[in-house]
Amino acid sequence: MKIRAFLGLGNPGKDYEKTYHNIGKWTEERLRQLHPEELKASVDFEKKEAFVNQSSILAGSLLKNKPYDMESMLVIHDDSD
């Protein structure tokens, strides 16, 4: 299946700025830097200011307005649990 969306998770605010909790945000930003043209045309990046523990609500609301389902969304997170 083709990846249609990346959701780079992280926590907003100064307290989390340089912690592993933002690995999803960093990965998304790096992918955008490395492959700006290829990804711009083929991948819908979503970057929102929400805490990681609210990510299921965020992912659900993003999918509600998109022409693809959850199987085509790659969620990048810190995997600390």
Image (tube, rainbow, N blue to C red):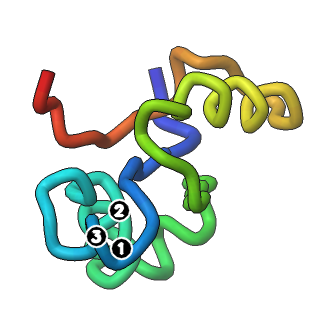
Mark 3 / mark 1, whichever is N-terminal: 3
Look at discs 2 and 3 and give the one toward the viewer.
3
Look at discs 3 and 1 and give the one toward the viewer.
3
Give the alpha-carbon distance from disc 1 to disc 2, as whole Å.
6 Å
Q: Which residue is mark 1?
A: 29
Q: Which residue is mark 2?
A: 25
Look at discs 1 and 2 and give the one toward the viewer.
2
Task: Please say if 64 is above or below 76.
Answer: above
53 vs 31, left or right, is right
Determine whether the residue tagged by mark 2 lies in a helix, strand or loop.
helix
Point out the residue furthest to the right here.
65
Rendering coords of residue 41 (x, y %): 62, 66
The answer to which quarter of the image holds residue 33 is: bottom left
Rendering coords of residue 77 (x, y %): 28, 40
Foreground of the two, 57 or 37: 57
Mark 2 / mark 3, whichever is N-terminal: 3
Rendering coords of residue 11 (x, y %): 39, 56
Q: Residue at x 28, y 70 (%)?
A: 15
Determine whether the residue tagged by mark 3 lies in a helix, strand or loop.
helix
Question: At label 1, which amino acid type do we have?
Answer: Glu
Q: Residue at x 84, y 26 (%)?
A: 64
Task: Please say if 6 is above or below 81.
Answer: below
Q: Are marks 1 and 2 in contact (CB under 8 Å)?
A: yes
Task: Please say if 34 is above or below 81.
Answer: below
